[in-house]
Amino acid sequence: QVQLVESGGGSVQTGGSLKLSCTASGDRSSRYFMGWFRQAPGKGREAVAGIYNSYGYTEYADSVKGRFTVSRDNADRTLYLQMNLLKPEDTAIYYCVAGDTYRGLNLDSVSYWGQGTQVTVSS
């Protein structure tokens, strides 16, 4: 089992920055992949960014490439998402996720979810 707790959400203006954190506990082997999904009002959950394997390979959704950076500490206990140049369309609940296998940046890689943290970007 893996428990995930997000923090760092909030409200910013267009062009601003936020850094999300996710603290993980439980079986490390179940956290081979860790990442971030988001859900905007009235929309489905969307993959944002992910990091996997011991080399820390990363993947990003096209909509956030060049603006967001995902990283984790060496013990794989804390996952981060640095969000720069935020846009109103980035407004969503952001979820930390984890899984024991990487099958691409999609729901097939996700076994565990955090409770989510709200990010609001105003124009």
Image (cartoon, rainbow, N blue to C red):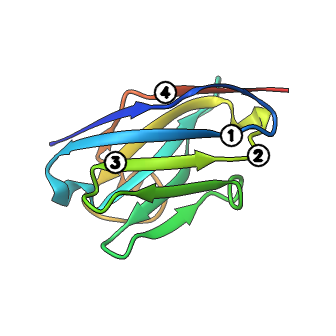
Question: Counting other residues with Cα less than 10 Å from the Cα at mark 1, is it few (<14), some (14-19), or many (20 or more)?
Answer: some
Q: Earlier in the sequence, mark 4 or mark 3?
A: 3
Q: Earlier in the sequence, mark 4 or mark 1?
A: 1
Say the numbered circle drawn on residue 104.
none
Residue behind mark 4:
117
Residue behind mark 3:
78
The answer to whether mark 2 and mark 3 are in CB contact below 8 A is no
How many angstroms separate mark 4 from mark 3 (CA)? 15 Å
Which of the pair 5/112 is nearer the observer? 5
Q: Measuring from the top left, give residue 92's x and y in whole percent.
A: 62, 30
Q: Which amino acid type is shown beneath numbered disc 4? A: Thr
Q: Measuring from the top left, give residue 38's x and y in whole percent.
A: 55, 38
Q: Which amino acid type is shown beneath numbered disc 2? A: Leu
How many angstroms separate mark 4 from mark 2 (CA)? 19 Å
Question: Counting other residues with Cα less than 10 Å from the Cα at mark 4, is it few (<14), some (14-19), or many (20 or more)?
Answer: many
Relative to 3, say whether 122 is above or below: above
The answer to whether mark 3 and mark 1 are in CB contact below 8 A is no
- In this image, 31 relative to 115: left or right? left
- In this image, 49 relative to 84: left or right? left
Which of the pair 104/31 is nearer the observer? 31
Q: Earlier in the sequence, mark 2 or mark 3?
A: 3
Q: Which amino acid type is shown beneath numbered disc 1? A: Ser
Residue behind mark 2:
85
Residue behind mark 1:
17
- Which callout, 4 or 1, points to the residue nearer the camera? 1
SS for dot 3: strand
